[in-house]
Amino acid sequence: MSDNGSPLTITVRIQRFNPDVDRKLYLQDFKVAWQQGMTILDALHTIKAEQDGSLTFRRSCRHAICGSCAMNVNGRNMLVCEQPIKAHLNRKNEITIRPLPYLPIIKDLVVDRTTFWAQYMRVKPWLIPPENIPEKEFRMSPEEVAALQDAEHCIMCGACYSACTVVGTTKEYIGPHALLKAFLRVMDVRDSAPGERLADIAGSDGVYRCHTIFNCIDACPKHLNPTRAIETLRKLAQKRLAFEAARAERQKHLDKPVTSG
Ligand code: FES
């Protein structure tokens, strides 16, 4: 309901593009009856079900977990399944939805994430364990867990990657998503290849390519800080051999917890 009690009709403006018939991108308006609790994704579903079945977008979990529904709303990247649409309406009750920037458009709101995933795989995002795996379990101290800075909460939605102006100029750049994943592995005391990882990301398309503009922080729906992780990686890359030696020493005692002072 609107403030005066009448049903609220909102305008959802969506960027459309069908490569089979369209030569250019265009914006199309849809009128939708707002419902209490409606998310942006709910509005897209309503349009697809009731007005235009050809509208194409990605979504899966509807709970901000899978990362597939990341889109650009009124100029900001976000997960549309977790955003109440009313919070994003302008004074005329309009909202504008576009696909993630800097990525090729496949159709409507669906982008081609090939480079995004290729850069992710490039940093070997899996754990490379030491040869002497503890018989029972790895033991990490609270400080060692805290050093990961919640980077494991990244859901790979692409919001940071497509908000990055460096990605906008070159797809050679590894990108904030993959560098955050590299940070997670480098900082993890269970990983036995921090030196190799630091060498891999220290090139001109890695940590030194970041312009520290902070767009990735603004875009992250999980409130992570890829910029800070990249800065840490820069510092560690400069003392790579010492860091590598310290890790090897720490891995001799992975079955025992380490506590601070
Ligand atoms: S649908 Fe899975 S994060 Fe939005």
Image: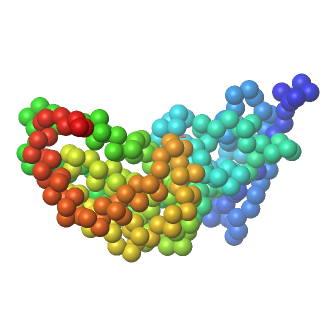
> How is the structure coloured here?
rainbow
| Residue 144 seen in render | yes
- Point out residue 223 in the picture as x, y percentages from the top left corner: 51, 44
Q: Nearer the viewer, residue 36 or 178?
A: 178
Quadrant assignment for the N terminus: top right
Image-quadrant location for residue 241: bottom left
Above or below 125: residue 205 = below
| Residue 69 seen in render | no
Above or below 130: residue 168 = below
Q: Nearer the viewer, residue 165 or 59?
A: 165
Above or below 27: residue 9 = above
- The mark tally for this picture is 0
Above or below 11: residue 2 = above
What residue appears at the point 70 percent right and 64 percent down from the top-left corner? 25
Left or right: 93, with 82 as reference point = right
Quadrant assignment for the C terminus: top left
What residue appears at the point 9 percent right and 45 percent down from the top-left corner? 252
- Point out residue 23 in the picture as x, y percentages from the top left corner: 69, 70
- Point out residue 114 in the picture as x, y percentages from the top left corner: 44, 62
What residue appears at the point 18 percent right and 52 percent down from the top-left corner? 247
- Point out residue 21 in the picture as x, y percentages from the top left corner: 68, 65
Image-quadrant location for residue 50: top right
Left or right: 123, with 261 as reference point = right
What residue appears at the point 33 percent right and 56 percent down from the top-left corner? 182
Outermost residue toward the front in this view = 261
Image-quadrant location for residue 139: top left
Q: Nearer the viewer, residue 245 or 57?
A: 245
